[in-house]
Image (cartoon, rainbow, N blue to C red):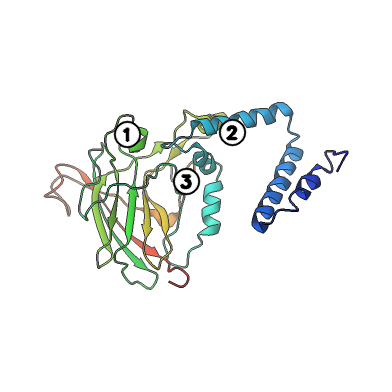
């Protein structure tokens, strides 16, 4: 087509996908072009503004490396991650809800036995976690693999710390025959997502805070069940209603119970004040599982 104008360019671009032999790719790209062009028209976007947008995306790519995924951070803070999770992981009644994966998961985290301390010397008050994994019929799920990761008392994940020799406050465990798994770690605290990159600059420029409420990440995988990626949030946290990545669900908020030294279920183990968390994970069965 010749004589492309602002009024016919959208149709012209979409027409270029006519020979695409992947129907889903064609659908997604056509919809992307339609909405992107509508955004340019609706906002009356200037060339200078579009150049700034390209600079922002370029900076986001430059900030991304094997330990920091700035594009996931961007997706999270714009609500795209949680929207995608919500529409792709609708759970049956009583199943544990999913939430965002986040940018700080590490594949191949160290394995631990039930009862081990996965904190690895991370700063923070002791936290004893006792959980079960079962299906929606109430049956225990033995042999489930559980990935756990979290920030420490300073608000940092291990991968954010330069020169750290080994992983800490993360690990993998397996549920026993009763579907139980348990471990010791440190009490999570609220923390700000990194603001030293383009995503942080975007938050500050728009008057948004960068804080996430205190939580522990869990990924639970078991044969015949849908993989669950979720958090357990600390009840009473000041940021539960304004999580910067929109990940909080009421069903995922739980009490992290404080115990004075010498009291409670771990009186003989903890040297001082400590906390306990009990949580039941309910997995939905995979189709055909």
Which is nearer the eye, 258 or 183? 183
For the residue carrying disc 2, how many other residues have a C-alpha within 10 Å: few (<14), some (14-19), or many (20+)? some
Which residue is under mark 3? 241
Left or right, 192 with reference to 31? left
Q: Earlier in the sequence, mark 2 or mark 1?
A: 2
Q: Residues within 10 Å of mark 3 (few under 14, many from 20)?
A: some
Distance (Cα) linking label 1 and label 3: 22 Å
Which quarter of the figure has residue 139?
A: bottom left
* Foreground residue among 236 and 164: 164
Can residue 13 be seen in the rendering of this structure?
yes
Name the residue beneath numbered marker 1: 154
Q: Is residue 48 above or below residue 118?
A: above
Q: Could you say where residue 25 lies in the image, as x and y percent from the top left? A: 65, 53
In the displayed structure, does residue 10 sit left or right of residue 26? right
Which residue corresponds to the image point at 55% horizontal and 58% vertical from the top-left? 87
Q: Residue furthest top?
A: 48
Question: Residue 226's x, y, as percent?
Answer: 43, 63
3 and 2 marks in contact (CB < 8 Å): no
Q: Residues within 10 Å of mark 1 (few under 14, many from 20)?
A: few
State the mark number for residue 5: none
Work out whether 239 lies above or below 24. Answer: above
Q: Which residue is mark 2?
A: 57
Residue 211, compared with residue 139, is above or below; it is above
Secondary structure, mark 2, is helix
Identify the mark nearer the N-term, 1 or 3: 1
């Amino acid at each position: 087509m010749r004589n492309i104008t602002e009024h016919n360019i959208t149709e012209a671009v979409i027409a270029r996908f006519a020979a695409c032999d992947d129907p889903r790719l064609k659908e997604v790209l056509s919809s992307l072009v339609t909405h992107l062009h509508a955004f340019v028209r609706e906002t009356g976007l200037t060339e200078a503004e579009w150049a700034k947008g390209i600079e922002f995306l370029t900076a986001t790519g430059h900030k991304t490396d094997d330990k920091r995924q700035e594009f996931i951070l961007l997706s999270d803070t714009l609500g795209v991650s949680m929207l995608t999770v919500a529409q792709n992981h609708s759970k049956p009644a009583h199943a544990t809800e999913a939430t965002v994966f986040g940018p700080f998961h590490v594949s191949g985290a160290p394995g631990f036995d039930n009862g081990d301390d996965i904190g690895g010397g991370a700063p923070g008050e002791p936290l004893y976690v006792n959980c079960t994994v079962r299906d929606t019929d109430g049956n225990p799920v033995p042999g489930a693999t559980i990935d756990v990761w979290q920030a420490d008392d300073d608000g940092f994940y291990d991968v954010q710390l330069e020169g750290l020799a080994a992983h800490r406050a993360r690990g993998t465990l397996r549920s026993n025959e009763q579907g139980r798994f348990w471990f010791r770690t440190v009490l999570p605290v609220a923390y700000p997502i990194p603001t030293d990159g383009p995503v942080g600059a975007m938050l500050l420029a728009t008057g948004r805070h960068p804080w996430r409420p205190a939580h522990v990440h869990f990924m639970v995988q078991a044969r015949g069940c849908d993989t669950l990626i979720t958090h357990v949030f600390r009840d009473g946290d000041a940021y539960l209603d304004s999580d910067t990545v929109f990940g909080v669900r009421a069903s995922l908020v739980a009490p992290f119970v404080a115990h004075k030294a010498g009291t409670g279920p771990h009186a003989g183990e903890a040297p001082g004040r400590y906390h306990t968390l009990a949580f039941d994970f309910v997995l939905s069965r995979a189709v055909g599982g």
